[in-house]
Amino acid sequence: MSHLPDPDLHGFKRRGVLFVLSSPSGAGKSTIARKLLAAEDDLVMSVSATTRAPRPGETDGKEYHFVDLEEFRRMVADHEFLEWAHVFDNRYGTPRAPVEAMLSAGKDVLFDIDWQGAQQLFQIAGGDVVRVFILPPSMAELRQRLVSRNTDSADVIEGRMARAAAEVSHWDGYDYVLVNDDVEDCFRKVQTILAAERLRRSRQTGVIGFIRKLMRGPGE
């Protein structure tokens, strides 16, 4: 459960946060994202569309919206994505309409996307976007995590390691950079960042009215 104070108690609301988590594959962002969603009541996950096939246990509309290449291209042409990217021979994109609906409902939206998606999202949404990049403690540790998953071939792991090096080079495109030495410690830091960003003055949309009322004093 979130322990943040509720701005509505003071008669004003806040703008939602578009909260981006990025990391090389295996650095732990998906685990931290799941923990954050479980802990924060007003945070909802942005569900990406993808052209890749569902993996065992995945449900359409939950982990991803699974679409074919023709449909994905139509969505791109019709500007239905906030961001999209071509990753490992598949395409991934963030549908615009569900995100806008969640923001209108007063929810913060969590994005599990790469640096390209984070950059595109920032270009569109600017100050509503908070970008957090999670690093592994070392590339050797990252390789070991990928191997221990026992889900990818050696060639796939090599491809992921090469991509990881490219992704790390874009670290300076993020607002916060964390090293995931310990998942619980890293999660707490991510949660602290979210709490602080929710309380930014620029996101307290009703604060001006509240201050005017406060300054009028009693009886005015």
Image (cartoon, rainbow, N blue to C red):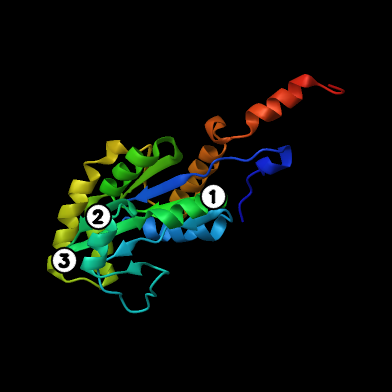
What residue would you read off at disc 3?
Answer: 156
- Type of amino acid at the residue the image marks with label 2: Ala
Give the x, y percent position of residue 57.
Answer: 37, 78
Q: Is residue 55 left or right of residue 2?
A: left
Q: Earlier in the sequence, mark 3 or mark 2?
A: 2
Name the element at disc 3.
Answer: helix
Real-space CA distance between mark 3 and mark 2, rounded to the nearest whole angstrom: 31 Å
Q: Can residue 28 be seen from the camera position used here?
A: no
Spatial CA span between label 1 and label 3: 40 Å
Q: Quadrant location of residue 95? A: bottom left
Disc 3 residue type? Val
Q: Amino acid at mark 1?
A: Ser
Give coordinates of residue 53: x percent, y percent. Answer: 26, 73
- Mark 2 and mark 1: span between their CA atoms? 25 Å
Q: Nearer the viewer, residue 151 or 127?
A: 127
> Going from the N terminus, do you reach mark 1 or mark 3 first?
1
| Direction from residue 215 to residue 206 in the image, left or right | left
Residue at the outermost right position: 219
Label 1 or label 3, whichever lies nearer to me, is: 1
- Mark closer to the observer (2, 1): 2
Q: Disc 2 marks which residue?
A: 77
**What residue occupies the far bottom of the structure in this picture?**
56
Mark 1 Cα-neighbour bin, 10 Å: few <14, some 14–19, many ≥20? few
> Residue at label 1?
104
